[in-house]
Structures are given as C-alpha cells and as structure tokens.
Amino acid sequence: MTGRTGLSRGLSVSIGVSVLLISLAPGATSDKEPAPAEKPKADKPKKPAGNGEPSADTKKPATETGPSLDEQYVREHLKDYLHASKLEFLEDGRVKMFFELHKQQDEHRSIFTPAVSDEINSRFRWSLREEWYYGWYTDAVDYLYRGGLRISMDSAAHLNVWFQDDVEAEMHYIQGINYNPKQRVAVVFTNGSGKSVGSNYGSQCAKFSNLSLESAPGKVDQVVMGKLVKNKLVVRNGTFEAYRNGKLNGKAKYTKSSFKSGRVGFIWGGSIAGFISQLEITGRIDSKKMAEFLRKAK
C-alpha cells in the first residue's frame, strides 16, 4: 500500500508540473482576457502665444482690408464738392456721376479748370438764351435741348476729378455752326503731362499733346448743325475707343504707363462753336490724387 501510494503521489506531482509548464509555453491560451490595446494619445490643443494671439498655424485666414484713408476721405467729400445731379459709388469700386449742364448750376462753375466764365467773349462759358431758342427741336429720342456749356474757337477744359485709366465718359454735344473738316470736338482723358487720348465727334480715336492734334485716323461722320450727338470715350487697359450714339467707330492703343492717372475733359478747335448739355462718367478714381486735391480745395 505504501509503495502504491508513493507512486500515485509521484505521478500527480509529475502531471501537475507538466501542466504548469504547458500553460507557460509560448502561444498557450489563458482564461484571462487580453489587455486592451493602448489608445493613441490625442494632440493637446495648442496654447495661445504669449500675447494672447493664436499661434501662426491656428490663425484664421486674413479678411479683406477696408478702404484706405484716402478712399474714405474721397467718399465723404466728393459729393459735396461736385454737386453732381447724380453720384453713386458702385460695388466694383468705380464711381458713376452725371451732370445736367443744361441747368447751368452755379455750383458747377468751379468744378472745371478753367472755371466756367461769365465773360461773353470767353471760350468756355454758359450758353445764352438767344443762342439756342430759335432752332433746336427734339431729336430721335425726344430730347429737348436747353443750352448748357458753350465752347468756341480753340481751347480745352477738364473736370477736377482724377481717375485711373479705367474710365468711360459720354457728353451730349450740339454743333452751333456749320461743320467743316478742320473742326474738332473731343471728350478726352488727359494725363498730368498734357497728353490726351479722346473721341473726336464720336467718330475718331484722337491723340493730343497740349491741345495740339497729333493723330486722328479715319473720317468724321456727318455733323448736322443743331442736332445732338452723343460722343463717348472708353479708356481701359491700354486701349481707348470712340463711340457715337452708342456705335463703336474706332479703337486704338495708348501707352498704359503714361496714363496711370488723368482727368476727363473736352478739347475743341478749328474755330468751332457748340454746346455741351450733359456729361456722364463712370470710372475708377485715383484716390490718392483726388484726396490731396479735395483737402486743398476745402
């Protein structure tokens, strides 16, 4: 009995040790659940920079800047200076202005250079009733001419507003005498050096230097005394165009670097006599020059 008991105990110990060794062997399973995989640590939010501003890589994109001080000054003072019949700042940054010159408002005398004169012999003055009452009737669009600025002989006048070379201007003009080919009446864009590009009678793209005509290719369409002509000039991105009564009649190039800034005006010659009853301009203002001018004009 004692020998069998000892043998049984020896077998039990041997089996127990084997089981223990098997459970510790590589790849052996266990009743315990495996430990969950370690989760990646989330990035901590970046702290603001020392002055309370967000760090460079957390800043929001910069928003568009507002108008400059010069632009704001022009917006605040241009209407009071010009006394335009209508003036509107457009969403695209341009300004649209309209002048009913046939009303001969006293406030409009000083917005031109030279100023509108009171002298009867002046080449740039208001028209007189006896100069137009007897023969001007309504035209095709039922527009009744009622006088306006009177231009004569050879000269020029400019509106005291500085624009960039992104501008279009249209004047309503009526010939006061019989036409001859030596005459010229142009709405122009003139730079600070006295060089001009213009629309002559709405028929030709003309270039001037200090009032002298340099070139005007093509011919002028028929001009009838007493009949209104809508003469329009468009200046933009190195090209200028001449329109008459809405029809494009000419296109030419100019040196863009020479016309970064300028004023809209009129150049006339050839012993002309005529009347400008309306002026409409849409353009991008040179805010720096215009603000400087308005500050001095106060």
Image (cartoon, rainbow, N blue to C red):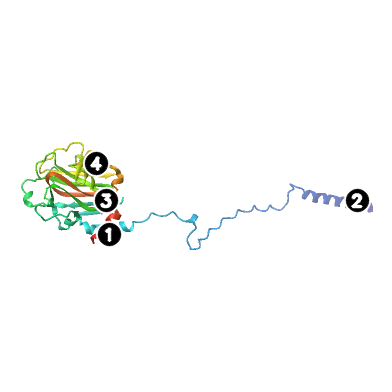
Viewer can see residue 246: no
Which circle, 2 or 4, is nearer the viewer?
A: 4
Q: Which mark is residue 268?
A: none
Locate the C terminus by quadrant: bottom left
Q: What residue does disc 2 label?
A: 7
Q: Mark 3 Cα within 10 Å, few/some/many (few <14, many 20+)? A: many
Q: What residue does disc 4 label?
A: 241
Q: Alpha carbon of mark 2 to alpha carbon of mark 1: how far? A: 115 Å
For marks 2 and 3 on the same chain, the one whose residue lies earlier in the sequence:
2
Left or right of residue 159: residue 121: left
Q: What residue does disc 3 label?
A: 163
- Residue extending farthest to the bottom is 51
Tag 3–tag 4 contact (CB < 8 Å)? no
Q: What residue does disc 1 label?
A: 76
Q: Nearer the viewer, residue 202 or 2?
A: 202
Indicate the amino acid at tag 1.
Answer: Glu
For marks 1 and 4 on the same chain, the one whose residue lies earlier in the sequence:
1
Q: Mark 4 Cα within 10 Å, few/some/many (few <14, many 20+)? A: many
SS state under label 2: helix
